[in-house]
Image (tube, rainbow, N blue to C red):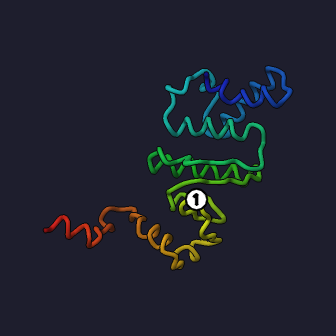
C-alpha cells in the first residue's frame, strides 16, 4: 500500500468523509508528522526507518485517540532519528492531549517522554516512579541492574566492569 492508503485506511473504516476530505486529512496528517504531499504515492520501501515511523504515527493519530500504545517505537532507529521522533511525540502529546503507553527497554527514551515509569520484571509490575530521582535512588535489585546497564553517551565515559576485565586479562 502507498502511504496515502496506509494512513487513510482507518479513516475509511471509521469516518464518513468524501474522497477529497479524506485526501486533505491525509495530507494534513503527513505534514503534521514532518512529511509532505509528495509522499502520498510512495511505498514503504521508498522511506527511511524514521519516515516509516512518522507514517505509523500519522495513522495512529488519524482518528484522534486519547491513548496510543507505542511498543519499541524507536528501538530500530539511530540516535538522531530517535530524538526527532521523541520530540514529535512530545509535540503531539501536548497538541492533541494524548496519553501514551510507551513500551521500551531504552530507559533514556522512556524518561524523555514519560510522566510516570512502571517497571516490569518477569511480567510483574515491580515499581512505579513519578520522577527520575525516584528511579535513580531505588534500591530494588532489578532497578539497580537496569541503572548499571545504562551506557554513557560518549564511549570515553564508559567503563568495563571488573568481571569483564578479568576475562580479558587472564
User: Which residue is rendered at x = 79% and y = 27% of the image?
Assistant: 13
User: Viewed as shown, does residue 89 lie left or right of 164?
Assistant: right
User: Which residue is rendered at x = 60% and y = 63% of the image?
Assistant: 124
Residue with the most extreme left position: 170
On the image, the x and y values in percent for residue 58 come to 67, 37
Foreground: 25 or 57?
Answer: 57
Q: Quadrant of the N terminus?
A: top right
Question: For residue 11, which quarter of the picture?
Answer: top right
User: Viewed as shown, does residue 98 lie left or right of 33?
Assistant: right
Question: For residue 131, which quarter of the picture?
Answer: bottom right
User: Which residue is rendered at x = 30% and y = 65% of the image?
Assistant: 156
Which residue was labeled with disc 1? Answer: 123
On the image, the x and y values in percent for residue 47 come to 51, 30
On the image, the x and y values in percent for residue 77 come to 47, 45
On the image, the x and y values in percent for residue 132 come to 57, 72
- As displayed, is residue 97 above or below residue 60? below
- As displayed, is residue 112 above or below residue 59? below
Please tell me whether mark 1 sits on a helix, a strand or a loop: loop
User: Which residue is rendered at x = 74% and y = 37% of the image?
Assistant: 62
Foreground: 111 or 35?
Answer: 111
- Total numbered circles: 1
- As displayed, is residue 95 above or below residue 145? above
User: Viewed as shown, does residue 54 lie left or right of 32?
Assistant: left
- As displayed, is residue 27 above or below residue 167? above
Mark 1 crowd level (few <14, some 14–19, many ≥20, 10 Å Cα): few
Q: Quadrant of the C terminus?
A: bottom left
Amino acid at each position: 500500500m502507498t502511504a496515502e492508503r496506509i494512513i487513510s485506511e482507518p479513516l475509511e473504516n471509521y469516518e464518513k468523509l468524501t474522497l477529497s476530505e479524506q485526501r486533505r486529512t491525509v495530507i494534513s496528517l503527513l505534514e503534521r508528522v514532518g512529511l509532505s504531499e509528495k509522499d502520498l504515492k510512495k511505498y514503504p520501501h521508498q522511506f527511511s526507518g524514521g519516515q516509516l515511523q512518522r507514517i505509523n504515527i500519522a495513522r495512529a493519530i488519524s482518528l484522534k485517540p486519547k491513548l496510543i500504545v507505542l511498543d519499541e517505537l524507536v528501538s530500530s532507529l539511530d540516535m538522531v532519528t530517535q530524538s526527532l521522533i521523541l520530540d514529535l511525540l512530545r509535540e503531539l502529546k501536548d497538541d492533541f492531549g494524548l496519553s501514551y503507553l510507551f513500551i521500551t527497554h531504552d530507559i533514556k527514551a522512556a524518561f524523555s517522554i514519560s510522566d510516570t515509569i512502571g517497571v516490569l520484571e518477569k511480567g510483574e509490575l515491580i515499581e512505579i516512579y513519578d520522577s527520575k530521582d525516584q528511579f535513580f535512588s531505588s534500591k530494588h535489585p532489578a532497578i539497580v541492574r537496569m541503572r548499571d546497564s545504562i551506557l554513557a553517551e560518549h564511549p570515553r565515559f564508559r567503563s568495563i566492569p571488573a568481571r569483564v576485565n578479568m576475562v580479558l586479562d587472564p
